[in-house]
Image (cartoon, helix red, strand yellow):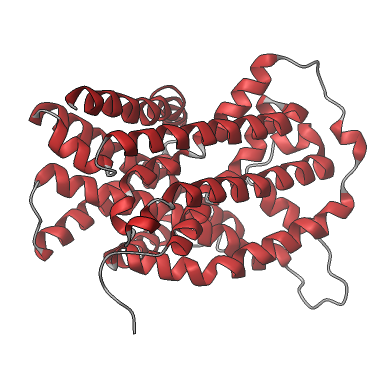
Amino acid sequence: MFSNNDQISRRQTFRLFTFDLMGISLLIVPAYLARNSGVWGILSIFLGILLGLGYIAILYWLSRRGQGDLLLDIQTGFPAWARDILLFWLVLHCVLIAGFCGFVFGDLMKESLVPEESYVLILAILFLVAGYAISGGIESRGRVYEILFWFVLIPLAIMLFMASGEVKSEHFVPAENFQWNMLFSGGYLVFIMEMPLFFGAFFKKYLPEQKKKKGLFSCMIFALLVSGAFLLAEYVILLGNFGERSLATMPYPAVTLMSTIQITGGFVKRLDALMLGIWFFTLFALLNLFLFHGVEFLKALAEPKEANSRKKRLYLVTILLMAAVLALIFAYLPETREWFYNYIWYAGTPLTVLIPVIIGIWKGRQK
């Protein structure tokens, strides 16, 4: 019924990127924006989208100078020592973010659905399912999220529309005067959440035809605009419902918002529990993204040639175990989360921007 050639369509590509970009941003960005930018966070979202569009332009420029696949450029265009350093960092970067995504997923489930359940058991089931999902390759991910796309986005849009009726205009009065650092710090935060775009540099090999390869960056732009529109709508509604001071104190404000929505007739008494599926699907997509590419980078680091199926399973198990251990560390050692935030803010995100630029300059000099 389906082909098995490790390739996906443009439509699946767009939907995958949309899920990846929405995965964690809709859950945790509003509270951070409220703390850092307040009402000015609305402008920060626009700035973050503009930065994301600029980043896509950088990746497009890189694709024109190199082979169109950043992994091939790293493997063939650099000395062995530089290649190994880059691949080693990419593996660690993917594992770190996958571990954090696993922590957020487990924390959300434990706090909202099964508070009495063991956190270790939740993570064990999560990573086992994730391992099974990515073992099917990029096609499996593309098919699943192509089907789920409207089942997730339509309920989310309905929920936001229902909550918009409780928006209060007085909550949009700034608590303090405008400062440029508010705008820029919030915009940078939104841009950090757009870093799944980085994997567009590794994505062309999964698109089947040359004319479709040219559409990769239009898929990324469209996914960025759609996810940015949902984030903007959510932030405006959250701000209008709770105000920036209350919003800043909520760990998962979107979940809190859903619990306040009342549906007449009693057909659905716990809309928040029903709508948690949105966050589970999007978070799971983001977790799979970093696990999937982490395995690919580990294979390239350990064995430049094509690995056999036994070694591929070994690489998959290695990445899953590393990410699961990190998720437990983030859960039981809260101080490590601050270290992770600092890494993403000061090192992880700048490196994902600079590395494509450095590789593009290097490839241009080789020509």
User: Which residue: 81% across, 18% down?
Assistant: 176
User: Which residue: 68% across, 15% down?
Assistant: 180
Q: Compared with residue 247, is residue 14 higher up or lower down, i.e. above or below?
A: below
Q: How many marks?
A: 0
Q: Quadrant of residue 88?
A: top left
Q: Nearer the viewer, residue 101 or 325?
A: 101
Left or right side of 9 for 248: right
Left or right side of 201 for 48: right
Q: Compared with residue 321, is residue 274 higher up or lower down, i.e. above or below?
A: below
Q: Quadrant of the N terminus?
A: bottom left
From the top left corner, tell me how far across and down residue 18 is, in percent: 53, 54
Q: Compared with residue 101, is residue 82 higher up or lower down, i.e. above or below?
A: above
Q: Quadrant of residue 30?
A: top right
From the top left corner, tell me how far across and down residue 89 is, in percent: 25, 33
Q: Quadrant of the C terminus?
A: top left
User: Which residue: 81% across, 36% down?
Assistant: 243
Q: Nearer the viewer, residue 251 or 294?
A: 294
User: Which residue: 8% across, 62% down?
Assistant: 308
From the top left corner, tell me how far across and down residue 47 is, in percent: 63, 29
Q: Is residue 104 among the parts visible in the rendering?
A: no
From the top left corner, tell me how far across and down residue 108 is, in percent: 55, 53
